[in-house]
Structure formats: structure tokens, C-alpha cells
Amino acid sequence: MELINNHPWREIMLSDIVDVGRNVNESNANWEYIDTSIAAMGTIAHAQLDIEKIQERALLLLKETKDMRVVAHLLRTLQHGKKPHEITLALALFADYIENFWQTAAPQPRLKLRLFKQVIQRFAQAQSTFETESTSIEQEVIRVQLDRIKSYFLNQNIQLDDAFIDLDRALTNIATKSAEKAERASSENTEILAQSSSAESKSDLPPAPNITISQHSDTEWKRTLIKVTEILFERNRGDSISFRLRRHAIFSALSEPMNNDGITDLSPMPADRVADYKSNIAKTDYAQWLKIENNLTVMPFWLEGHYISAQIALHLGHSDTANAIKEELQQLLLRLPMLIDFKYSDKSAFISKDMHSWLSEKKNVQQGDVSLAANSLLQCLNDQGLEEALKMLNAQPITPELRNQFHQQYLNAQLFAHAGFNTIAQQQAQSILLACQNLTLSEWEPSFFEALSDIANNNN
């Protein structure tokens, strides 16, 4: 995830210091505070500990010394809660440290190996929680970090600790089982939907797993939402709800990236990978589609990925999902319109020409569509009541054209009329009539005039 890749603690971990081999000064006030606090972790006094303060002081020390005892204490603050995103960050920090300071930093090798084993054992204690609550992205990040540590020791001809081998095997199995489970669920769902859409068939779906909902921080809330999208995708691949929810999780915290006259420091998705995704759209299956969706989570400003994902949705027969992906991206661009003209660090555009054409395609509401929508709403009114019918109406996307907006208000008035609220219906109808009386045709349906203008300009 981008929050792990760009986490500021990793920069501190990798920061240069004058003497890498320097031991931590045990009379240093920060060290005394950290060491005493960590000793109380897990005891009766644990509730009084200020974890953030421990972390702040550990990070200050890491700017002075790379002593592994400081690193182990910092990792302990992340490991103790067993939260998947903190475990992921902890392992990324540990891999950074191993690759850059294992040979040169304090303390002496024998003590360092003992500390290594303790750190690994604490990762192992979080294994069961990680298996049930981690996202597929976190599982992939964990595998990458384990591979980094393993490769380093193998390249240095250092024997791998048994505890590390067990952890590597266990966490790799978690990721493998998760992928197999998703693939199996997809196959089962396809068979169920092919057989019947009845409630009896739907009951054959496996029960939804329990997840921990955390709103303590934006990061925890985002990963909770991503976990829910993965469960929704696993249970009913291609359904638009999971795709909308993922984009809400990705887009909600986005703001204008740092830039110099529209050129950002953001790296683009590698061109060869994008070309590969595009050329294989017709061959893409659900598992590959999910990988692309995960890439979008990790690289939130890779906007072309949403275009590719929408094309895959069409290929797999999910036109509603393709429209949902486009609508969510359009909403982002309404909020952050500068992204339309922004460029990556190599000066390639955030939005390609194909994307511009795709985003500008208008979905007009024709009279037949209005009639169909009215019939569906009235059926909902008869079956479930006015409240549910209004919810159904409000869930429909609102387009910028006045014609479509007034049609939606007209449907709203119809619902109140059929429900017996004639006064409210009359007031709404009169309001619509007054608003429409002074409109010109070009204001009523601008897309019609745009289409005519395009033809006229092409003929000149």
C-alpha cells in the first residue's frame, strides 16, 4: 500500500548517521524511557503506557544510532496490537534495517541474532489475527518483505533461523489460501448464478467472515473498507457495490498532489505493464482483475487503471460495474478537476486521449428509460412502501443535464402521488413547471446541441 511504501518512519530508519556501529547510550533519557516502558508492556501497568510517546522517542534515537535494541523496541510497539497494517509496517521497517544495517550496526552479532529471533517470534504471535483480518494487499506486501529478508541472509551466506522459516511458510500459506479461497468462491458463485437467482441458491454461498471494523484513524478506516470490498468481491465478483466502495476508500482522502505547473513527482505505472493490461483485456479473468484493482489501491493516482478496469468489466459482462467505475472517477475529477491536466514525473498525462473520450461519453436518459425507471419505482412502492422507493430513486446517479435532473424530480412527484400524498405531489409538479418555463432548448438538453455542433464543425 502507498501508506507503507511512503511511510515517514522508513525514511528515518534508512537515514544516514555518522557512526552506524555506535551503541545506544544507556544513560540517554530517551533510551531509559523506552526501555522502561517496553518492560511494562503486557503487564498490569500496560494501560498507563503512552505508545505514541515511546514511538516518538525511538524514532529520535534512530537518528543517532542504529542499535538493533532500539529497532526491536519500536517494532514491539507495532507488534503488540496485532493489527495487520501495523504488522505490515513493522515487517517493512525490519526488512529495511536488515538490508542496510545488519552487518554494521550494534550490538555484537550474537546478541543481534537473539534479538532477531525475538522479533520474529512476536510476528508469529500475530499470525492468526493476520490470517483473518488482513487484506490481500497486506498479504502481498508481507510476502515481499519476507523475501527481502530471506534473500539478504542467503546472499550473505547466513543461516536462516528456524523461527523465520516457520513464519515465512505460515504467512506465505495465508496468502496462497486466500487466493485459492477467492478463486473457489468465484467458481461457486458463477455456478450458483447460472443455476438460479433464487434465495435458495444464494443460501449456498459460504458465510461471510467476521472482520474488525476500526475507525480510530483514517488509515485503519481505509483498510477496513478495502477488506470489506475484498469480501464482497469474493462472494459476488463483478457486482458494482464492491467497486464503488473501493473507490470511496481510495478517493476520499485524496487531495491535490504536489506539483510544479501541473507536473508532479509521482511515478507513472510502468508503460510495458499498462500495455500488457490493455492488450490482454479480452483474456483477463477475475483473479487478474482483482490484481489490477489492488494496483489501483496502491497507486491511487494511476487514473488510467480505472479505464482499464471498466473495459474488463464490460468484457466480463458487467456493464453496470463499468458505469459505476466511470461515475466514481468522474466524481473524483469534479472534486479535483486539476487532475485532468496533471502529468507524472516523466511528463506523461494522468489521463490519456482514450480516457478523455471515455469520460466525455454521455449517458442520456431517454423517454423509454424514464418509463422503465417509473415502472421499477412504482413496483418498489407497491412491494416495499414509499420510503424504500424513495431510497431507490435517490440511489440513481444524478447527471449534470437539467433534462435528466427534472425527470428525476418528476419521478419523485409521481411516487408521492401514487402513495396518496397529493398535495406534496402537486407542489413538486408546480415547482418543476415554474422552473422549466423559461428554459431554452439548449439549456434543456445541451448534449443534443453539442452533437449537432460536432457534425457542423466536421462538415466545415
Image (cartoon, rainbow, N blue to C red):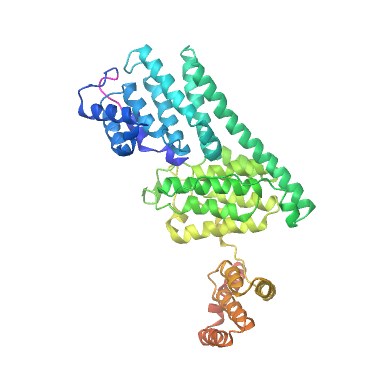
Q: Main secondary structure of the magenta part?
A: loop
Expressed as whole percent of the image width and height from the top left, the position of residue 24 reads 26, 21
> Is residue 418 or residue 452 the one in the foreground?
418
Quarter of the figure with the C terminus: bottom right
Expressed as whole percent of the image width and height from the top left, the position of residue 107 reads 32, 16
Name the quadrant containing residue 272: top right
Q: Is residue 68 visible?
A: yes
Name the quadrant containing residue 82: top left
Outermost residue toward the right?
195
Horizontal side of 280 relative to 197 (left or right) equals left
> Is residue 82 or residue 429 the one in the foreground?
82
Horizontal side of 262 relative to 144 (left or right) equals left
Residue 236 to residue 267: above or below = below
Name the quadrant containing residue 447: bottom right
Expressed as whole percent of the image width and height from the top left, the position of residue 117 reads 43, 19
**Residue visible at 61% across and 78% down in the picture:** 415
| Magenta residues, start to end | 16-20
